[in-house]
Image (cartoon, helix red, strand yellow):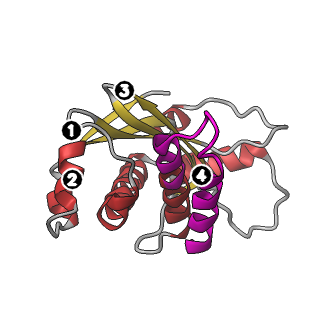
Amino acid sequence: MLALLMVLVNLAAGQIGKDTYSPMKRDSEITRITLENYFKKYTDDQLLNRVVKTATHYQAGEGLKVNIDARNARIMFDNGIVWHSKQHAEIMDTFFDEEMVSLQQERLITCLLAFLRDFNSYLPQISSTEAYTFDFEVRDQVRKDETPEETEKSKLRTYKLSITIQQKDVASLKTETTDLNTLRNKITIEKSKL
């Protein structure tokens, strides 16, 4: 990870003389890559998602928004069948009930909180009136040749989870040791349909 950060810093240093250099863009990219790698390597609890890609966008007056494409984990059983999207949909409907979706959300939140606790210094500096927003777009993984049927349970496991933390709360992380439960009280969580 350190090598990756060095490459990013060197790329940014090469852009100093150009009009495109921006500390916000540089720091946002470092945050994006670090967050994506953190989710891919997280081992505390089994995540029920696979982070496919991330993107960042800064808007003055609002703050930094991080979009995270977090696909539902494919559930595979060794039952000797050839892959078929209808059979997979049935397995997904069986596995991802309300309780499992709730657990999935909880683990995404816990992983993000651990990232904020461990890597808050990687976040770009924003105004004290702005916030960091992390938008998880959760949906099933679909191959290009598939058009799965929409079911009531597929609607349940297709959603957007937005987690927002104010800049002042992130700044306090730099000066005090905070456990995940305390940090959880400082975030705002919203769930909506995609």
Q: What residue does disc 2 label?
A: 171
Q: Are marks 2 and 1 in contact (CB under 8 Å)?
A: yes
Q: Amino acid at mark 3?
A: Ala
Q: Residues within 10 Å of mark 2 (few under 14, many from 20)?
A: some
Please state the extent of the stretch shown in magenta in the rendering.
1-30
Disc 2 from disc 1: Cα separation: 9 Å
Q: Upstream in the sequence, badge 4 or badge 3?
A: 4
Q: What residue does disc 4 label?
A: 12
Q: What residue does disc 3 label?
A: 60
Give the side of residue 113 with respect to residue 171, left or right: right
Residue 152 image point, x, y percent: 51, 31
Q: Upstream in the sequence, badge 3 or badge 1?
A: 3
Q: Upstream in the sequence, badge 4 or badge 1?
A: 4
Q: Amino acid at mark 2?
A: Ala
Quarter of the view holding residue 132 = top left
Quarter of the view holding residue 184 = bottom left
Q: What residue does disc 1 label?
A: 128
In the rendered image, residue 177 lying in the magenta stretch gets the answer: no
Disc 3 from disc 1: Cα separation: 12 Å
